[in-house]
């Protein structure tokens, strides 16, 4: 019940539910309440993929630090990265790192990984449980497959009773890290069938439908018979969508779950800047479309109260926040990555107050 309220009701209901959540996790919390910090307001935007998690850890941190206000808008990873570069926000959420061709932040910054979770291939097809290979997904989303009883889908699902219903492809219309990670999977796993490239935006075929945010894609899939779209795990579950088991690099059809996302994260190599790529990672139990996500923060803070608030919130994320992740359908980070992230928090410099 708490999980459903937190997802559907946003930060207000998440805040109401949190004292119970914290009580239930008190025995496993890894960091104590922090010393009282000076009042500050932090503004951020970006990834809708991490929105549900951000809501619950913002509310949780507020329980400890009543003088701190953190505002976060889910405007998409691309908008978040751009606003961070332009100094519009104090931090940003992104599911993808800056490309070398992107406008770059004007001063040194850090990537802080927070959680991982699956990107589902959700569909509206009553009474059908699907397995989908990367090649079939690529053909569906590129428009090469247009009906649900296509031979390629039958090959993935030899025992299923597939209708002749037309397929409506739903995708993100905004600049999106979910799009980037979904298309990255297709580029890696089905290079011969996926020719639209990988990025926060791509040129989708005519006849497809776009929606803003993960929740927007979820709603359009739910409202459209025969629709299919890529949706983060939390929003797919909140909307009660069906989603396919996806063939991974080991040739196994794996259902999206927190355990299969954790298996993918464990198999990924972490770079020195704490970026990493769990997409199509090795392991029989790894879900192949597992997304990372980061909060990006400037290394040298210019406002003491804001800088201490950012550090305090990040420390909360790497303590109690990790224990709360599964309550909102995200998987916590591997322990080694949490340790590295905590060490990186200490490198944020804050001026004397």
Image (spheres, grey):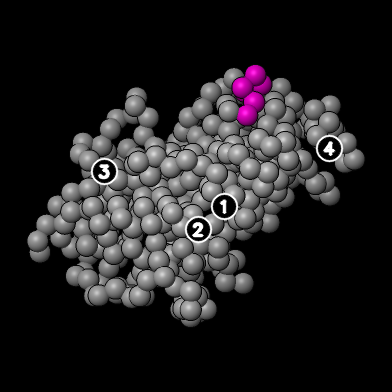
Q: Earlier in the sequence, mark 4 or mark 2?
A: 4
Residue that carries the numbered disc 2 in the rendered image = 332
251 shown above or below 307: above
Q: CA distance from mark 2 to mark 1?
A: 8 Å
Kindly check if marks 2 and 1 are in contact, taking CB atoms under 8 A apart as contact.
Answer: yes
Residue at image location 18% in from the left, 54% down from the top: 349
Q: In the image, which disc is placed on residue 157?
A: 4
Q: Earlier in the sequence, mark 4 or mark 1?
A: 4
State the image quarter where residue 314 is shown: bottom left
Report the side of 259 relative to 78 (left or right).
right
> Alpha-carbon neighbours of circle 2 within 10 Å: few (<14), some, or many (≥20)?
many
> Alpha-carbon neighbours of circle 3 within 10 Å: few (<14), some, or many (≥20)?
some
Q: Earlier in the sequence, mark 2 or mark 1?
A: 1
Q: CA distance from mark 3 to mark 2?
A: 23 Å
Report the side of 352 relative to 106 (left or right).
left
Kindly check if marks 4 and 1 are in contact, taking CB atoms under 8 A apart as contact.
Answer: no
Residue at image location 80% in from the left, 46% down from the top: 129
Residue that carries the numbered disc 3 in the rendered image = 109
Q: In the image, which disc is placed on residue 289?
A: none
Q: CA distance from mark 4 to mark 2?
A: 32 Å
Residue 57: percent from left, percent from top: 42, 64
Q: Quadrant of the image for the N terminus? A: bottom right
Residue at image location 36% in from the left, 34% down from the top: 98
Badge nearest the viewer, 3 or 1: 1
> Alpha-carbon neighbours of circle 1 within 10 Å: few (<14), some, or many (≥20)?
many
Residue 220 painted magenta: no
Residue that carries the numbered disc 1 in the rendered image = 262
- At mark 4, the secondary structure is loop
> Which region of the structure is painted magenta?
189-194
State the image quarter where residue 31 is shown: bottom left
Q: CA distance from mark 4 to mark 1?
A: 26 Å
Q: Earlier in the sequence, mark 3 or mark 2?
A: 3
């Amino acid at each position: 019940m708490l999980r459903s309220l937190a997802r559907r009701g946003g930060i207000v209901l998440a805040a109401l539910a949190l004292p119970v959540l914290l009580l239930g996790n008190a025995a496993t919390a890894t960091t104590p309440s922090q010393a009282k910090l000076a009042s500050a307001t932090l503004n951020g935007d970006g990834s809708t993929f991490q929105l549900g998690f951000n809501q619950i850890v913002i509310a949780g941190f507020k329980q400890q630090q009543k003088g701190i206000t953190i505002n976060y808008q889910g405007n998409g990873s691309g908008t978040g990265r751009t606003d961070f570069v332009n100094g519009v926000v104090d931090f940003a959420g992104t599911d993808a790192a800056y490309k070398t061709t992107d406008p770059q932040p004007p001063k040194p910054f850090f990537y802080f990984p927070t959680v991982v979770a699956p990107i589902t291939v959700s569909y509206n097809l009553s009474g059908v449980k699907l397995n989908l290979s990367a090649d079939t997904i690529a053909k569906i989303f590129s428009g090469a497959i247009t009906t649900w009883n296509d031979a390629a889908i039958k090959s993935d699902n030899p025992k299923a009773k597939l209708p002749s219903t037309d397929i409506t492809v739903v995708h993100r219309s905004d600049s999106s890290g979910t799009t980037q990670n979904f298309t990255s999977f297709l580029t890696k796993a089905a290079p011969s069938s996926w020719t639209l490239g990988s990025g926060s935006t791509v040129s989708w075929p005519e006849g497809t439908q776009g929606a803003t945010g993960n929740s927007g894609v979820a709603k359009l899939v739910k409202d459209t018979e025969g629709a299919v779209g890529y949706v983060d795990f939390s929003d797919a579950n909140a909307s009660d969508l069906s989603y396919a088991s996806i063939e991974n690099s080991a040739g196994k059809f794996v259902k999206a779950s927190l355990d299969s996302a954790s298996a993918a994260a464990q198999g990924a190599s972490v770079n020195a800047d704490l970026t990493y790529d769990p997409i199509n990672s090795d392991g029989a139990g790894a879900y192949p479309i597992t997304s990372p996500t980061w909060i990006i923060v400037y290394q040298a803070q210019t406002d003491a109260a804001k800088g201490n608030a950012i550090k305090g919130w990040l420390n909360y994320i790497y303590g109690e926040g990790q224990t709360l992740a599964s309550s909102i359908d995200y998987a916590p980070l591997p322990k080694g990555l949490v340790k590295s992230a905590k060490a990186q928090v200490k490198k944020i410099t804050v001026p004397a107050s």
